[in-house]
């Protein structure tokens, strides 16, 4: 009988969720398309569970041009109606319009930044400010941080929507700007090693 490795407490028994936890969550991401996709999907998650979004992720990718923001920024009324009527995604008009708005904001941001990655990684917390021991209780108490507040404030100033500080902390957790795998999670060390290999000077 194979013994399952110890994972973070929030992972359920579905394979799609386990794979997401084991291979994606908390590993540093510097790919602009993935970063844009995630910030959009975090907006769609508002008020819902991540597993709901995860099960629909391929449908979202199909509906939103694989989250190529240069294409999404060109979406018009016909695209909004198409997406509102797409049963494969979350058919929330406000969130759909926010994703299109954010694509246009991403284009504007890239007029002054080298990449989305270069921008977002500027908000990585100083390691000294992070908890020395990540437990279930510590993680449950951390729904936002000074950095997620700063990121949220700056994005809102730039016109982005559905980017509140709690949503941005979830984004930072998922994209590896923080490593919030609990201490006994078998993935924690792998995520730490991946971060050590990351060279932010190349962004």
Image: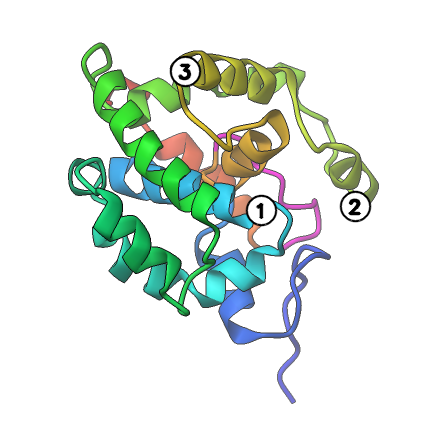
Residue 96, how many percent across, how many down? 39, 46
Q: Which residue is found at the position 63% from the left and 45% from the top?
A: 181
Corner quadrant of residue 49:
bottom right
Q: Horizontal placement of 195 versus 145: left or right? A: left
Q: Is residue 147 magenta?
A: no
**Would residue 75 be visible to someone looking at this image?**
yes
Identify the residue position indicated by label 1 in the image. Answer: 188
Of label 1 and label 3, which has the lower sequence position? 3
Q: Which residue is found at the position 18% from the left and 13% from the top?
A: 111
Label 3: how many residues lie within 10 Å, few (<14), some (14-19) or many (20+)?
few
Identify the residue position indicated by label 3 in the image. Answer: 122
Q: Horizontal placement of 179 versus 31: left or right? A: right
Residue at disc 1, secondary structure = helix
Distance from Cα at disc 1 to Cα at disc 3: 22 Å
Q: Which residue is found at the position 41% from the left and 24% from the top?
A: 160
Q: Horizontal placement of 178 versus 108: left or right? A: right
Q: Which residue is nearer to you in this view: 72 or 171?
A: 72
**Would residue 194 be visible to someone looking at this image?**
no
Q: Which residue is nearer to you in this view: 47 or 190?
A: 47
Magenta-highlighted stretch: main secondary structure?
loop
Distance from Cα at disc 2 to Cα at disc 1: 13 Å
Corner quadrant of residue 17:
bottom right
Quarter in which the N terminus is drawn: bottom right
Query: Is mark 2 in CB contact (under 8 Å) with mark 1?
Result: no
Identify the residue position indicated by label 2 in the image. Answer: 136
Residue at disc 2, secondary structure = helix
Residue 57, how many percent across, how many down? 40, 61
Q: Which residue is nearer to you in this view: 152 or 136?
A: 152
Quarter in which the C terminus is drawn: top left
Q: Which portion, as a residue range, is magenta?
A: 177-186
- Asked if residue 136 is positioned above or below residue 23 in the image, the reply reads above
């Amino acid at each position: 009988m194979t013994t399952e490795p110890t994972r973070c407490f929030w992972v359920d028994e579905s394979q799609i969720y386990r794979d997401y936890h084991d291979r994606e969550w908390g590993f540093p991401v510097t790919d602009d398309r993935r970063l844009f996709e995630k910030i959009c999907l975090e907006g769609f998650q508002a008020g819902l569970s991540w597993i709901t979004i995860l099960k629909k992720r391929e449908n979202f990718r199909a509906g939103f041009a694989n989250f190529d923001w240069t294409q999404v920024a060109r979406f018009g009324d016909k695209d909004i109606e198409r997406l509102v009527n797409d049963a494969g995604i979350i058919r929330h008009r406000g969130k759909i319009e926010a994703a299109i708005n954010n694509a246009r904001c991403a284009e504007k941001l890239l007029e002054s930044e080298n990449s989305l990655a270069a921008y977002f990684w500027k908000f990585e917390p100083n390691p000294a400010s992070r908890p020395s021991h990540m437990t279930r209780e510590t993680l449950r108490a951390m729904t936002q941080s000074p950095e997620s507040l700063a990121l949220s404030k700056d994005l809102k100033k730039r016109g982005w929507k559905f980017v509140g500080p709690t949503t941005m902390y979830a984004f930072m957790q998922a994209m590896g700007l923080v490593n919030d795998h609990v201490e006994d999670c078998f993935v924690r060390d792998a995520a730490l090693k991946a971060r050590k290999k990351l060279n932010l000077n190349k962004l």
